[in-house]
Image (cartoon, rainbow, N blue to C red):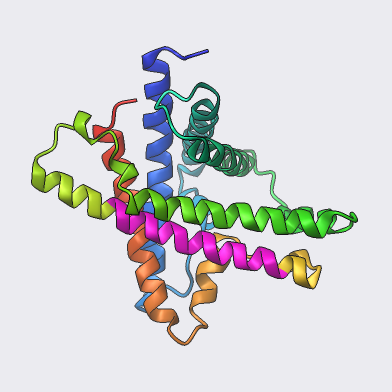
Amino acid sequence: MKLPHNARYGLFRIGSAAKGLVYLLMGVFCLAAAVGVARSTGGPQEIIRWLGSNPFGRIVYFLLGLGLLAYSVWRWYKFFANPQRDGWFSRVNSISVGVAYAGLALYTFMQFFREQTGEDVRKDLLQHLLSFSWGEAAVYLIAVLVVGAGVAALQLGISNQHMKDVEHWELTERQESVFRNIGRTGLSGVAIVYFIMAWSLFRVGQQQNGNEFRGVGESLAALEGWTIGWWLLALTGVGLLAYGIFMFLRVKYERV
């Protein structure tokens, strides 16, 4: 069943704007950490908490939660209805992305209702998963899927698939070139984060320890300890910032 045009366009625009805001701020925090202005990087959960740390925090949590939920619904809709005629690889990727953003939306609403424990539920779930005989294989499978998401991000940029609807954007040749490069840079930054997260999942399987898992924020922070960590952190920060900008460009120009 296909949604009316206004409904699916609303899901896409609201959801993409929420996602773009989170990635934009992640890039800013990452670059700030790279140059020594900030003491640490920030993943989506840290960004969400930061956005809510103001007198209007509960309103921010509610609106951002709705936006992230809209993006999750949009990705699930893309899988089932396939309104943009995506290939199967992209459609399957929409499932994992939809689940991830549903989790972020839930986390944001939990902040709104002040239901928080300070524990990392993801690590607890991974540890519980490892208690089963098939748990290690399942963790490795999740890691492979995360690698696949990173490869998909790179493939989108290299093949210019992120610009497949460019004919509807009404851009000049120069604008098209700039937007294409912004998208490629952003997708490269996203891929780096996915690959680091996948590496941590492989560590979870090897060590049989859910605490080895590194989310986005922890994955970025891990770069600081590497020999070339400053450069990787700066590169990733630029990529995340570019991806956030590109999401807003899609909101403005893309038609679904």
- Name the residue: 44% across, 57% down: 190
- In the rendered structure, the answer to whether residue 13 lies left or right of residue 57 reads left
Residue 12, image x, y percentages: 40, 30
In the figure, residue 10 lies in which quadrant?
A: top left
- In the rendered structure, the answer to whether residue 249 lies left or right of residue 125 reads left
Residue 184, image x, y percentages: 31, 55
Main secondary structure of the magenta stretch: helix
Q: Is residue 49 magenta?
A: no
Residue 101, image x, y percentages: 55, 41
Q: Is residue 202 above or below residue 183?
A: below
The answer to whether one can see residue 127 in this image is no
Q: Is residue 194 magenta?
A: yes
Residue 106, image x, y percentages: 62, 39
Q: Nearer the viewer, residue 77 or 112?
A: 77
Q: Nearer the viewer, residue 54 or 74?
A: 74
- Name the residue: 24% across, 49% down: 180
Quadrant location, the C terminus:
top left
- Name the residue: 45% across, 80% down: 229
The total number of labels drawn is: 0
Q: Which residues are magenta?
A: 183-203
